[in-house]
Amino acid sequence: MRLKAILLIPRREGILRLSQAETVIAIGSWEGFKAREISAFRPTPDGWAVAVVFQGSPIDEKAGCNLWFPQAGEIQDILKAMDRSDYLTAEVLGRGWSRGPRPYLPLWTLM
């Protein structure tokens, strides 16, 4: 697989608003989603989600699964998008959070 795009997608009322996605990075031609919105898979508060879009490659078929050989810069871009998602989600919620795999408690939420 090859990295095609990294996106930030707003999630409101259990719906991922694909038509409002913000492109963090696009490699080659990213033409967007077919659907304008889809139901989120799991219930979470309103906020922003990071989506990583891949394009298949010939090695995937040979291996019998999807393989991604990331470049260091791609991983850094994903981490930056996750940081931005946390910031935007805290703004939507009006607070940070202390639970989960990525707690986020900016100073302004403690004041």
Image (spheres, helix red, strand yellow):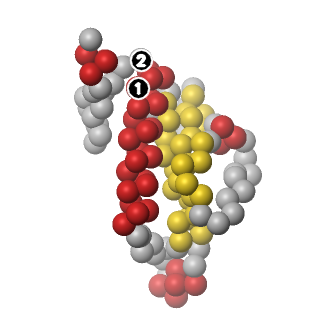
Residue under label 1, please give it.
Answer: 90
Specify the quadrant of the image occupied by residue 40. top right
- Whether residue 63 is visible here, answered yes or no, is yes
Instruction: State if disc 1 and disc 2 touch (CB < 8 Å).
Output: yes
In the image: residue 61, left or right of residue 108: right
The image shows residue 46 at horizontal and vertical percentages of 50, 27
Q: Residue furthest top?
A: 111
Residue under label 2, please give it.
Answer: 94
- Report how far apart the C-alphas of labels 2 and 1 lie in the structure: 6 Å
* Amino acid type at mark 2: Gly
What residue sits 59% from the left and 69% below the top? 55
The image shows residue 50 at horizontal and vertical percentages of 48, 46
Who is closer to the viewer here, 9 or 61? 9
What residue sits 40% from the left and 26% below the top? 90
Q: Is residue 77 above or below residue 62?
A: above
What number of labels is visible?
Answer: 2
* Amino acid type at mark 1: Ala
Q: Which mark is residue 61?
A: none
What residue sits 48% from the left and 23% below the top? 92
What residue sits 27% from the left and 34% below the top? 103
Q: Residue furthest bottom?
A: 62
